Amino acid sequence: MPIKLGVRELIEFTLRTGDLGTTSNSQNTALLGARIHRRLQKQRGADYQKEYYLDKTLTLNNNEYLLHGRADGVTLTDGQASIEEIKTSETVFANLSTNTLTLYWGQVKLYAYLLMDHEPDLDQVTLTLTYFQTNTETTTQTDQTITRQEAQEFFDKVIDEYVTWLKFRSDLRDRRDPTIQQLTFPFGHYRPGQRELAVAVYKTILTSKRLFAEAPTGTGKTISTLFPTIKAIGEGVIQRIFYLTAKQSTRSVAEEALDLMASQGLLLKSITLTAKAKITFPEEADLLPEENPYMLGYYDRLKPALLDLIQNNDQLTRPVIETYARKHILDPFEFQLDASLFCDVIIGDYNYLFDPQVHLQRFFTTEDPDNFFLIDEAHNLVSRSRDMYSAELTTRPLDQLIEQSRDLDQATPKLRRRLQDLRATFSDIAAPLLADGRDDSTFLTPPEAIDHDLGRLVEAIHDWLVDQPHTPFTQAILDYYFAAISYQRIGDYYDDTYRMRLTIADGNITLKQLCLDPSAFLSDSLALGHGAVLFSATLSPMDYYQRVLGGNEDSRERKISCVNA
């Protein structure tokens, strides 16, 4: 089975240079980008083929690789070809960095190489970069033409740069796989229920299903799920495990299980991801990206740091990441994410897969059958996922911003007006509730007036922030800006599984988009991998948990008994 290599991954790893910044792309979810893509694709002609799949099998370092990707749009007519790549962010096109444009064009050039490899009669391809600025909804299009020879030269240059890293990854696999194949269950005997659970997990992997497993506390669920999944890596069925849970304590248990198997000869790379608020160095807290030494020149120092880290460590825990981040002067949060690309087991919180606002875009923008999900204490995911797909706005910080903008005279008249407009709309919505002497109401449809005024406020803040120094007022505005964007993003999901809730307490008005049933969203997330095991000591009634946690008609279920025979 060839090793999969994504076009975007290849381009970003080989061509990205310079500083780590809070880029506009990182502020827009995959959902927003996908929605804009669909809108633009619908405007194209009848010959336009959207999400055009391209691939090529390569032999490098005596290993087979499948280079693959989906061009946003391809048109093939009368011996002529064009490829469109759509990009979205809030930055004005003219202000995009040189390296950002290099990455954009690099991706579409590689698609052109793959297309001409499939279409031998093509001598050249027209490349179109369509850039959509999300906050103004303006579109900029630029074109280039690339010949077959130019595409070949570009491909050769990128592959030559990457081949060292391919060999590095190949060497890691060659080191890993024999130790997995020789690995035996790390205890002298199975506890009651352990073997049954391990077998059920292994069968689930082989059949690419979703397993819902209930086993009592004390069964040893962590080792019983990790062990068969690691064995499947050694057989080439999958390549990466995501062990996701709600609590730090259970993440530590997973680390201990890996430690135990390592003591018996297992050689694989694992990483435990830490939340940004916890792992960011204290001295970074009040620095802008352009002032932060851990962000300036980040990509210029990244590759040597990755080699140093990966070559010298198998378990990449928080202390390890922090040590090497300081050594190489790299932001520890982003460094751990870049390091995770080289890891076989990734341990972290549920939100890295399921949360639409912070999920790992480097892994979860498209389906990847190399990934398998282990979801520990899955009963906790019910309430957590409702929170992930809900969002609220309140008036208390809005009132404070309005007051500060008057007292400090820091806001432009336009920004102050937009703040006041939104506050007035909140009051209008709450007025009928107050007139009835109530402080709580639930209704079906989001208030259009809020959406309208919020959109205008977000645009005004975005324009205002461009030239502002970092002050407490600027930070307060930024905090509300992010809350507003979060509310807008969740609004893109709003359907008949949602309700609006309006509450009033001590003069503070809260408007919440409340997700009642996130099961479809969870199912979509689980579909991004080869399969999944959701396990807990508490999954009864089983049919309920299967329904609310994204089970489908092919899901398996298993209740494990620990009664000694």
Image (cartoon, grey):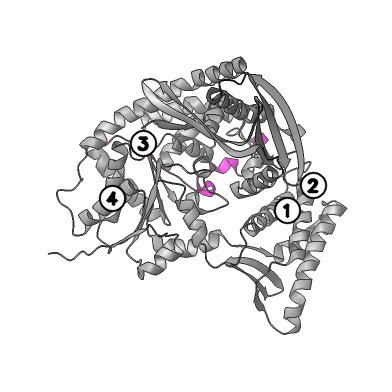
- State if disc 1 and disc 2 touch (CB < 8 Å): yes
Q: In this view, does 205 lie to the left or right of 127?
A: left
Tag 4 near tag 2, CB within 8 Å? no
Residue 410 lies left or right of residue 358; in this view the side is: right
Q: Nearer the viewer, mark 4 or mark 2?
A: 4
Image location (x, y in percent) of residue 127: 67, 27
Q: Where is residue 551 in the image (x, y as percent from the top left)?
A: 42, 60
Q: Does the magenta stretch include residue 354?
A: no
Q: Which of 281 and 165 is in front in this view?
A: 165
Q: What residue type is labelled 2?
A: Trp
Q: Is residue 360 above or below residue 248?
A: above
Report if residue 368 is visible in the image. yes
Tag 4: amino acid: Lys
- Which mark sits nearer the N-terminus, 4 or 2? 4
How far apart are labels 2 and 1 at the CA level? Answer: 10 Å
Quadrant location of the N terminus? top left
Mark 2 highlights which residue?
464
Q: Distance between the residues labelled 3 and 1?
A: 41 Å
Residue that lies at the very extreme toward the front in this rendered image: 78
Label 2, label 3: how many angstroms apart (C-alpha)? Answer: 45 Å
Q: Determine which residue is flagged by label 3.
A: 269
Residue nearest the observer in this picture, 489 or 471? 489
Q: Name the amino acid, label 1.
A: Ile
Q: Is mark 4 on a helix, strand or loop?
A: helix
Residues shaded magenta: 265-291
Examine the rendered structure and indicate whether residue 423 appears above or below residue 325.
Answer: below
Q: Is mark 1 on a helix, strand or loop?
A: helix
Residue topped by disc 1: 477
